[in-house]
Amino acid sequence: MAIVFGRSKTSATVTILGGGAWGSALAALAADRGHGVKLWSRRGELSLEAAVRDADIILSAISMKGVPETVERLQTIDLPPSAVLVSATKGLDSATRRTPSQIWQAAFPNHPIVVLSGPNLSAEIQQGLPAATVAASTDIAAARLVQTVFSSDRFRVYTNTDPIGTELGGTLKNVIAIAAGVCDGLQLGTNARSGLITRALPEIMRIGTQLGGQKETFFGLSGLGDLLATCTSPLSRNYRVGYGLAQGKSLEQILEEVQSTAEGVNTTNVLIDLADRQGIPVPVSYQVYLLLNGKISPRQAVEALMERDLKPEDGG
Ligand SMILES: NC(=O)C1=CN([C@@H]2O[C@H](COP(=O)(O)OP(=O)(O)OC[C@H]3O[C@@H](n4cnc5c(N)ncnc54)[C@H](O)[C@@H]3O)[C@@H](O)[C@H]2O)C=CC1
Ligand SMILES: O=C(CO)COP(=O)(O)O
C-alpha cells in the first residue's frame, strides 16, 4: 500500500512534543529518514501552535505528569484534521488512573491514536545501536504510517492492533525494573533476578488484561522485550532507582542523581491503587510500593517475597 504523507508529499512532517531523552532520540530517527521534524519543548522558543501546524504526525514523548496539561493546551488549538497522534509516554495518570493514550483518545476522538513502545533505552538509540519497537493502533493505516516514518536499518518498527496492551507492557515493567535494581543492588545473583522477572510477567499480565490489554501482547517486544531490557540495564532510570535504594540511598537523593524521569515511582502508586480496587494480586509490585513509601527496607521486601505461601507456578 502506498503511504501518502499529507497532500502530494513524499516525506512526512513530524512534530515531536517533549525535548527530553526520548523525544530527542525519536526526533533524530525521523530526521535521519529525511522527514521534516519539529521538536517542541515547553521551555523552547517554538510555540505549540507553530509546532503542530501542518503536522502529519504529532508524537508525544512528554513525561506522564505533563501529558494532561499538554493535551488541554492542544485542545485550544486547531490540529491538522488528518494528523496521526502518537503516544510514546510510559506512565499512568495519578488523577484518573488512565493511560496516556486513553487521555489522548478522549481529547481527540476524531484522530487516530498510535502507541509507540518497546525495549528502547534512548541512550543506545542515540548511539545508533540496533533496536526494535511496536507501533500499535486500532487504526492499522495509522500504525503503518508510523512504522514507515520511523523504520530504518537500525530501528525496526512492528505494528499491532492492541494499543492498550502495548502501552501497559511498557508502563508496568517500570515497577518491576525498580525491583530488579533492588535485586542487583543487594547482589542477590542471576538466579534471583531471573526468578523475579519471570514471576513478574504473569503479574503484569493479570493487571494488564484486566485493564483491556490482550494476553499475547505481553509476550512481545513491548511486554517481555521491554521487561528484559529495563530489568537488566543500568541505563534504565527505574532500575537505577531500585539499585540506589538497595545501596541505602534515599529516593530523593536517587531522583536528584538521575536528573530525568523515572516513571516507575508514580506508576507504582497508581498501579497499587488500581490493583486494590480490582482485587488483583500483584505481590512484586506491592513490595516495590512499600519500599518506595518508606514502609520496609530492601531486605525486608526480599524476605516478604520469599516467605509468601507456597503455591503452584500458575497460581497468583
Ligand atoms: N528515555 C528512554 O529511554 C525512554 C523513555 N520513554 C518514556 O518517554 C517519556 C519521557 O521520557 P524521557 O524523555 O526519557 O524523560 P526526560 O525527563 O528526559 O524528558 C521529559 C520531557 O517531558 C517534558 N515535560 C515534563 N513535564 C511537562 C509539562 N508539564 N508540560 C510539557 N512538557 C513536560 C520535559 O520538558 C521533557 O521534554 C517517559 O514517559 C518515559 O517513560 C519511553 C521509551 C524510552
Ligand atoms: O522505557 C525504557 C526503555 O524501553 C526506558 O527505561 P527507563 O525509563 O527506566 O530509563
Image (tube, rainbow, N blue to C red):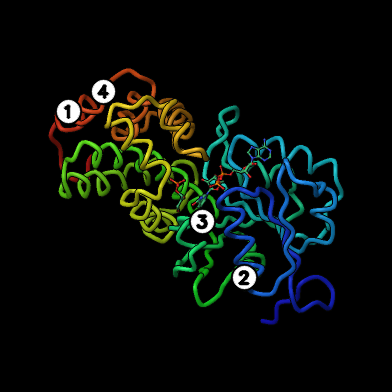
Foreground disc of the pair 2, 3: 3
Q: Name the residue under label 3.
A: 117
Left/right of residue 228 with respect to residue 56 in the rendered view: left
Q: Mark 4 points at which residue?
A: 297
Q: Name the residue under label 1.
A: 303
Question: What amino acid type should be assigned to the residue bearing mark 1?
Answer: Glu
Instruction: Point out the tag, 4 or 3, that comes first from the N-terminus.
Output: 3
Instruction: Point out the tag, 2 or 3, that comes first from the N-terminus.
Output: 3
- C-alpha gap between disc 2 and disc 3: 14 Å
Question: What amino acid type should be assigned to the residue bearing mark 2?
Answer: Arg
- C-alpha gap between disc 2 and disc 4: 46 Å
Left/right of residue 86 with respect to residue 212 in the rendered view: right
- C-alpha gap between disc 4 and disc 3: 32 Å
Asked whether disc 2 touches disc 3, contact meaning CB atoms under 8 Å apart, the reply is no
- Secondary structure state at the residue bearing disc 1: helix
Foreground disc of the pair 2, 1: 1
Asked whether disc 4 touches disc 3, contact meaning CB atoms under 8 Å apart, the reply is no
Q: Where is residue 95 in the image (x, y as percent from the top left)?
A: 60, 27
Instruction: Point out the tag, 1 or 4, that comes first from the N-terminus.
Output: 4
- C-alpha gap between disc 1 and disc 4: 10 Å
At label 3, counting other C-alpha atoms closer than 10 Å, the crowd grade (few under 14, some 14-19, many 20 or more) is many
Q: Position of residue 96 (x, y in %)?
A: 60, 30
Q: Which mark is residue 83?
A: none
**Label 3 lies in ligand 1 vicinity (Cβ under 8 Å):** yes
